[in-house]
Image (cartoon, rainbow, N blue to C red):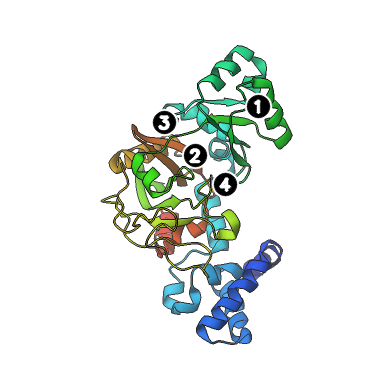
Amino acid sequence: MITKRLLYIPYYLFKTNWKLFFKYSRFVKAQKGVSFFRLYKEVIYTMFKHNASPLDYFSFNFFDLSEEERATYPCTGFMYEYQLKMNPRKERAVLHDKIKFLELLNDFSGRQWASIAMLKSDKKFATEFLSKAGKKLVLKNSTGGAGKQVEVIEIPSGIPESVIALMEAEHFDLAEHYVIQHDELMRMSPSGVNTVRVVTQYIEGRVIILFAFLRVSVNSSVDNLSVGNYGVNFGAAINIETGVISGPGVYLDITKPDVYYHPVTQTPVIGFKIPYWDECKNVVIKVSALTSGNRSVGWDVAITNEGPVLIEGNHNWNLLSMSPGRKGFKKEFLQYSTMI
């Protein structure tokens, strides 16, 4: 095991955002009154003990947890191996490629979409597609992730050629009609579509919803929590049974305080009820069964006034998805690993 753990070290050193690491280090040093020597010693220990990246130590607040509590969190190395086992590479294409995803699950998407190939091959279709899009259009790279390579644009005069030229220049190959979110979510934050992340486990023919949280935009056109080095948008854990937000909003940037009222709209976070919650759960249960070759998936669902619409599914959902609920699921994952 030690040899295997050593193989991860060069990857961690190469991939770590060291600017963020040192920002977190200074913050914890000041908050806890510990020396850098002790702090870095702890980071190195967790890298070997828990197969954790240097940032995992801070992101999961290991500096406040006992060794027993730390062991409940599946860190970077563990999650890589777990997701590879649960979501084999040969099965991932339907989730990795947004065009293939929409082709398979179009009945759940609740919006019109078109690949750049479709727009270029049929001008009449392209013109009609843009004329029905309203004021905004979402452009994506079909294999992009973590909110990257996504842009919301005002439709430029509805001329297909101008949209196609922009897509080619920015390497976008997918266009989608902009989803108008539910009035209640608009009340929470109107700057972007605030989606629900629901993480499911498909095991022995059944779908288990492990946890869910609302991704809340703050003066941002996208709601992904990684925007701005984790410091722009926040997530708020949802009670799976009731659909009600059960705790304060949490930024993935650990230096930022918890959120009890949206900083722009002042809407209370705790107690906010997700509209159409039962329908939202039903959607992810149905699509989990349809894509059962991928057993561990992070689904993104938007809620409209008419009900939930499926945005995408992630086979490599970020382990920081566990941060808003402040609960690790390593015990559960170890159990599921023995069942396949």
In the drawing, what numbered circle is on residue 312? 2
Mark 4–mark 3 Cα distance, whole angstroms, equals 20 Å
Task: Evaluate whether residue 2 shows in this view.
Answer: no
Query: How far is disc 4 from disc 2 in space, using C-alphas?
Result: 11 Å
Residue at 30% of width from left, 40% of height from top?
A: 276
Mark 3 is on which residue type? Phe
192 sits to left or right of 12: left
10 Å neighbourhood of mark 3: few (<14), some, or many (≥20)?
some
Q: Earlier in the sequence, mark 1 or mark 4?
A: 4
Q: Residue at x 37, y 62 (%)?
A: 260
Which labelled disc corresponds to residue 163? 1
Q: In x, y percent, where is residue 220? A: 53, 49
Say which of 90 and 56 sits in front. 56
Q: Nearer the viewer, residue 314 or 171?
A: 171
**Residue 147 has which mark?**
4
Disc number lying in front (4 or 2): 4
Give residue 300's quadrant in the image: top left
What separation in Å lies between label 1 and label 2 (alpha carbons)? 23 Å
Judge whether 253 appears above or below 93 on screen. Answer: below
Image coordinates for residue 116, horizontal then vertical, percent = 64, 25
In primary-sequence order, the first of circles 4 and 3 is 3
Q: Residue at x 46, y 34 (%)?
A: 179
Give the spatial CA distance, label 3 vs label 1: 26 Å
Q: Which residue is mark 3?
A: 108
Q: Secondary structure at mark 2?
A: strand
Tell me which label, 4 or 2, sits earlier in the chain.
4
Secondary structure under the numbered disc 1 in the rendered image: helix
* Mark seen at residue 11: none
Q: Earlier in the sequence, mark 3 or mark 1?
A: 3
